[in-house]
Amino acid sequence: MDWRERLKLLIQNRGYKITEFSEKCGLNRDYVSRITNNPKSNPKIDSLQACCDELGISLGQLFTGDNLSDTREEAISIISKMGQKEVAALTKTLKSDDWKDEN
């Protein structure tokens, strides 16, 4: 997974719409859309840092995926493909104690 895909998945995983995310980062919506979707775009490092800050990750984690385990990235990928109802059901389940191991 390249850094653009990782950024896009993390934005989606955090429940942001592109408009909301770009506002929180202090960036133009179209600019953030280009960063995540256009492989020919060349974003400024301070813009990427603003995105990382909002997501709670480092630039290194964005580029390498380090400390974002394969399991976590796989989960992010799966969740990003779910519909709103599926995400709501998953969230409800995770917030309950029903799924936890009793050991």
Image: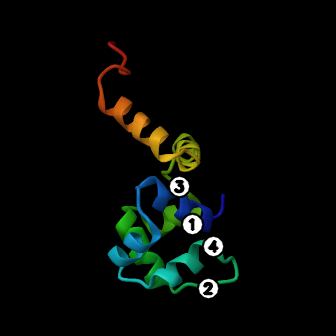
Q: Quadrant of the N terminus?
A: bottom right
Tag in front: 1 or 2: 2
How packed mark 2 is, by other alpha carbons closer than 10 Å (few <14, some 14-19, many 20 or more), is few
Q: Specify the label residue 63 is tagged with.
A: 1
Q: CA distance from mark 1 to mark 2?
A: 14 Å
Q: Which residue is mark 3?
A: 66
Q: Quadrant of the C terminus?
A: top left
> Do callouts 1 and 3 mark residues in contact (Cβ within 8 Å)?
no
**x then y, percent, for residue 27:** 41, 83
Q: Is the residue 21 above or below the residue 98 in the image? A: below
Q: CA distance from mark 1 to mark 3?
A: 8 Å
Q: Is the residue 72 above or below the residue 39 in the image? A: above
In front here: 28 or 50? 28
Q: CA distance from mark 4 to mark 3?
A: 22 Å
Q: Which residue is mark 4?
A: 37
Question: Which residue is depicted at the point 60% across and 66% down?
Answer: 3
Say whether disc 3 or disc 2 marks the residue closer to the N-terminus.
2
Q: Which residue is mark 2?
A: 42
- Circle 3 SS class: loop
Q: Quadrant of residue 94?
A: top left
